Amino acid sequence: MEIELFAEAPCLVAEGPRWCEAENALYWVDITAGHVLRKKAGTHPGAFEKFDPRLGKIGAFTFRRDGKLLLFTERCEIHEVAFGGTPELKWTLPGHAATRFNDVFDAGGGVCFCGVAPIRPDVRGELWRFDATTGRFDCIEPATDGMPNGMGLSPDGKTFYFVVSDERRIYAYDFDPVTRKVSGKRVLCADFAGDGVPDGMCVDPADGTLWVAVWGGHRLEHRAADGRMLETVPFQAEKVSSATVANGMIYVTTANLPFDKAAFESQKAGCVFAIGKKD
């Protein structure tokens, strides 16, 4: 597979890539710097925009129907904002002011699944279901053994996937497309034997396969819907953080934490890459 540099943005932890059809653009966050970035397809790698909403770390975001963003941030707060605008605090996960949101997945109908980061040794990771229509939070997983990370939904809307990085596992759940609730948790795969741990991931809407970023492993893994390894895509950058499939491409984010100028210059660590999908 041919890997192209999509955005030459020197991020610390580029994550959460999401495609905006209306703008023909990719959005993503720099978690550590607390920035939201975007870049239109077909433009020069340096033609990205960066927005600092001054909210501290931003774990992820989702799109609102009106084009605004929901930012999932430090203190487990959710802010609404237009790109470049002034954020408005909308919701807070009670009792979680000492931690932050990590990866988030928009399941449609106003429902999001939200990972909560274990930022201290005495705190476990968590997974919550949030309904923006009611403002209600429901705990799905109260104690993961490490960082809750990438999530995705099968094309038929029946299977929800969830990565726990430090467990080196991807879990699968039954997903009810009507209630948008999950049940029937099981281990999908636990064979991440090489360097690194699974991080962000996405489901390919065309065939239901999984694209799994491996943090610390210099690679993106392509897996079948049942977890079997299909192929690996090697990267020069060590910390491959997430991926999304859109616009006939696979967009892949990477990290450069702590920032290393040499790694940025030689490997484009912290930048976003694009891979053309096979026919």
Image (cartoon, helix red, strand yellow):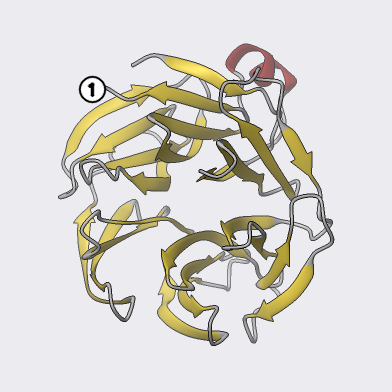
Q: Is residue 101 left or right of residue 51?
A: left
Q: For the point 56% across and 64% down, which residue is it?
A: 117
Taking the image as drawn, is residue 205 in sight? yes
Callout 1: SS? loop
Which residue carries the number 1 mark? Answer: 279
Local crowd size for mark 1, using a 10 Å CA cut-off: few (<14), some (14–19), many (≥20): few
Is 219 placed left or right of 50 in the picture?
left
Compared with 272, 198 (above or below) is below
Front in this rendered view, residue 176 or 172 = 176
Which percent across, then down, holds residue 211? 33, 39
Viewport quadrant of the C terminus: top left
233 or 157, nearer to the observer: 157
Q: Specify the quadrant of the image occupied by residue 172.
A: bottom left
- Quadrant in the picture for residue 207: top left
- Note whether 30 is above or below 167 in the view shown: above
Image mark count: 1
* Residue 148 vs residue 114, the one in the foreground: 114
Q: Quadrant of residue 195?
A: top left
Q: Residue 145 vs residue 85: left or right?
A: left
Amino acid type at circle 1 is Asp
Q: Position of residue 169 (x, y in %)?
A: 30, 54
Residue at screen point 61% across, 43% down: 28
In the displayed structure, would residue 104 be above or below residue 4?
below
Q: In the image shown, does 272 or 26 lie closer to the viewer?
A: 26
* Picture coordinates of residue 136, whole percent (x, y): 53, 87
**Image quarter in which the N terminus is found:** top left
Residue 256 appearing in the image: no
Q: Position of residue 275 (x, y in %)?
A: 41, 23
